[in-house]
Amino acid sequence: MAEITKKWYKEMSVYQIWTRSFCDSNGDGIGDLPGVYSKLDYIKSLGVDGIWFSPIYPSPNCDYGYDISDYKNINPEFGTLDDFKKILDAAHGLGMRVFMDLVVNHTSTEHMWFKEACKSKDNPYHDYYIWRKGRGNKPPNNWLSVFEGGAWEYNKNLDEYYLHVFAKGQPDLNMDNPKVREEVKSIMRFWLDMGVDGFREDVITFISKAEGLPNGFPLPLATGIEHYKHGPHLEEYLDEFRQVLNEYDCFAVGEGPMTGLKDAVNYCTEGPGQKLDMLISFDHMNADCFMADWVKLPFSLRRLKSTFDKWQTEMYGKGWNSLYIENHDHARIIERYGSIKFRVQSGKMLATMYMLQCGTPFIYQGQEIGMTNVRVDHVTEYKDVMTFNNYRLFKKLGFTEKMFLNLSFKVNRENARTPVQWTGGKNAGFTTADEAWFKINPNYTEINVEAAEKDENSLLNYYRKLIKFRKEHEVAVYGDFKQYYRSSGSLFVYERNYEGKKLLVINSFSENPVKFDAPAGIDLSAGELVLQNYEVLNPGKNSFMTKPYETRVYLFS
Ligand code: NOJ
C-alpha cells in the first residue's frame, strides 16, 4: 500500500470567504473585514481549521478583486491592513490559519507597474507585461480572452498591444522577466512574514506562455489556451516560488483550469521537486456541462464518479487532493448535482460525498446553509464581466434576454456571489444599508443562518458534525479510496481504509428508492452508523431501499 505522510494541511477543513458578499459592518452595502471579524466565532463554530480569503487587495473591481492594483495592501472598501492583522491574530488565537489568494498571472491596469509600463517602451516596467506589435492592423495573434473578446488591447501611444488572457483590465505579467518573479517572491514574503499561512494561487498554471505566442486552435473563447495552460517554463517558475514557501511553515494550493490529472500528480508529488501541495482541479465540476459551466449538459453521476475515482486513486500516496463542490466561480451545487425539492437532504448527501474523500475539503460561504441560485429580471442586474461577455456570445447564437437569463440562472457563477443570508430580517442581516451591492436571494426569509442554528437537523448542523467527524477520525483523512457500484447511475458508494479502520460511505443521487445491498464481505451490523440524513431504524440491515438523496456513513473499527 502506498505510503502516506501526515501533514497539518491534510487534516484541515478550510472555509472560503468572498468578502464583498460575506458581512457588511459599516452599512455601505458591501461586505468588509470588520464584518468578517464579527463572524469569526461563527466560522470557528463550524469546526474548520482555516480561512481562505478570495482577493482582498486594492482593486478597481473589473473582476472583483482578481484585478489587483496593490499587492501589499487591503482594499479600502473592505478596511485596512490593521483590520486584516486583527483578523489574522484573532483567527490564530482561535486555532485557525489564514490563506491569501495570490493572483500573479495578471495585475490590474491600475497597478503602478502597468501605468509605468504604458509610459514608454524604455520604461523599466514595460517588460513586466507581454507587449507585441500587431500584424498590420490586426492583433499579434488570434488568441481570445476568457472574459472579453480578443486577448490583445492596443495602446496607441506605444503602437503595441498588451496581452490579457482575462479581462482588458487584467494585463498578463511577463513571468519570463526575472524581475517580475522577484516581485512575486517579495509579495509572498510580505504576507508570510506578517503571519499568513499560505496561498491559493490563482490560475497559476497559466503563468508561462509558449515561445513566439503562436496562433491557437479557434474556440468561442480562450483561443490559444493550449499555449499557456502548461507553458514551457511553468515548472521552473513554480520551483522558484516553492523555495520561498519552503522557508515557512505554510502551504500552497494552485488553481489549475484545464490541468489534467497527470500534470496535477506531477506538480503535487511529495519530495524533492514538489511544486504545489494541492491543485484545484475543475474535472469534477464538469459532470453537468461540457468543458465550461455555460455549455450545459444533463448531470451524469457516472461521469462524476469516474472523475473522482481517477483523482482519488492516482493521487493517493503521491500527492494530495483539494476537495470542493462550490466556490465563487460556480453556481450553487444543490442546483447542479442535488435537488431543490430535497434541498437539505441532498445538501447533506453532497457534503458527505465530497468531504469524506481523501483530500483537504474547502467549504464556500453559504454552502453550509444550502444557499441556492438567484433569478434576476434583467441582465443589467448582473455585475460580472464574464456574464456580459457570455451574453454577447449567446446573443450571437440567437438567444433572447429571457433565454439567456434562464440559462444563467442555472450556470452563472454570480449565483454564488449573492450576499450571505444571516437572518430572516431586513437584507438578510447582511447589511443595514437600504440596498446590498448585489441582489439578495429572496429566499433568505427561509434559508438563513439564524434559522439553521435553531434547527438541530439543519444542513448547517450536519456540516458541523461532518467536519468534526473527519477531524476526529484519521481514516477519514488518510484512508485510501475504493469504489463500489461503479456502473450505478444512482448510487455513489465508496470505502476508505486506514490502519485497520474502514469507512463505508453510501450516497444516493436519486429521489426515487434505490436498492442497496452491502458489498460482498461487508456486514453493516458489524459497523457503527456514524452519519446519516434520515432516521434509520435498523442500521445493521445489509439490504435496504434508499430514501431521497440518502447518505449513510458506517465506521468499522
Ligand atoms: C480564477 C478565479 O477564481 C476567478 O474568479 C477569476 O475571475 C480568474 N481566475 C481570473 O483571475
Image: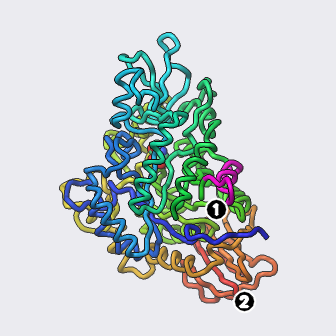
Of all residues shown, which one is farthest toward the top?
136
Q: Secondary structure at mark 2?
A: helix
Look at the image and tell me whether residue 358 can be seen.
yes
Q: For the point 57% across and 76% down, which residue is it? A: 470
Q: From which residue to which does the magenta span run? A: 261-275
Look at the image and tell me whether residue 412 can be seen.
no
Q: Which mark is residue 320?
A: 1
Q: Dot 1: few (<14), some (14–19), or many (≥20) neighbours within 10 Å? A: many
Q: CA distance from mark 1 to mark 2?
A: 31 Å
Q: Amino acid at mark 2?
A: Ala
Q: Secondary structure at mark 1?
A: loop
Q: Quadrant of residue 233?
A: top right
Q: Is residue 24 left or right of residue 443?
A: left
Of all residues shown, which one is farthest toward the right?
520
Q: Does the magenta segment cover residue 163? A: no
Q: Which mark is residue 391?
A: none
Q: Earlier in the sequence, mark 1 or mark 2?
A: 1
Q: For the point 66% across and 72% down, which residue is it? A: 478
Which of the two discs, 1 and 2, sits closer to the camera?
1
The image shows residue 76 at horizontal and vertical percentages of 26, 50
Q: Mark 1 near ligand 1 (CB under 8 Å)?
A: no
The image shows residue 402 at horizontal and vertical percentages of 40, 40
List the residue tagged with mark 2: 526
